[in-house]
Image (tube, rainbow, N blue to C red):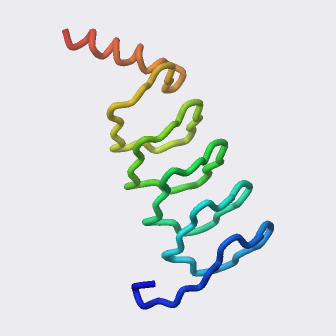
Amino acid sequence: MSDGKPSIPFDGPQLSGTRYHRADMAGCNFDGVNLSGAQFHAVMSGAAFHDTNMSETDFDDVNLSGATLSNINMAGVTMSNVNLEGASIDNANMTGMQINGILVADLLAAYQATRI
């Protein structure tokens, strides 16, 4: 490696079922890693997820404040007990999206009607 750190090859190990408890993995790079069924009880602030399939993932008691989400497919996602204070949604396909059981398209139409 050119950064002066020793190179430790860890390519292709079978670690299925391994538990890591209080491990410092700051700065790790996971590329082509199968984490299906994995559980994370961790600090991941500053982590980056690129080209990642997280379909059918369960997020519970997760803090995403200040996060940036772009090029995200959230089709069929259910969110409940969510704090969206100060959230901004731009350039989104909201076809069929509901807030508290009301279609967003209907909410926007009603809003536009009051502006005339």
Q: Is residue 115 placed above or below 85 in the rendered structure?
A: above
Q: Is residue 71 placed above or below 19 in the rendered structure?
A: above
Q: Is residue 73 left or right of residue 20?
A: left
Q: Is residue 89 left or right of residue 38?
A: left
- At 39% from the left and 30% from the top, the residue drawn is 92
Q: Return the residue nearer the eye: 112 or 23.
A: 23
In the displayed image of the protein, which residue is found farthest to the left? Answer: 116
Q: Is residue 21 placed above or below 67 in the rendered structure?
A: below
Quadrant where the C terminus sits is top left
- At 61% from the left and 60% from the top, the residue drawn is 32
Q: Return the residue nearer the eye: 53 or 46.
A: 53
Query: Percent x, y for residue 98?
Result: 50, 23
In which quarter of the view is residue 75 placed? top right
Q: Return the residue nearer the eye: 40 or 7.
A: 7
- At 42% from the left and 54% from the top, the residue drawn is 65
Q: Is residue 56 left or right of residue 115?
A: right
Number of numbered discs on residues: 0
- At 49% from the left and 24% from the top, the residue drawn is 97
Query: Percent x, y for residue 5?
Result: 47, 89
Query: Percent x, y for residue 33?
Result: 64, 62
Q: Is residue 116 placed above or below 107 in the rendered structure?
A: above
Query: Percent x, y for residue 22?
Result: 64, 80
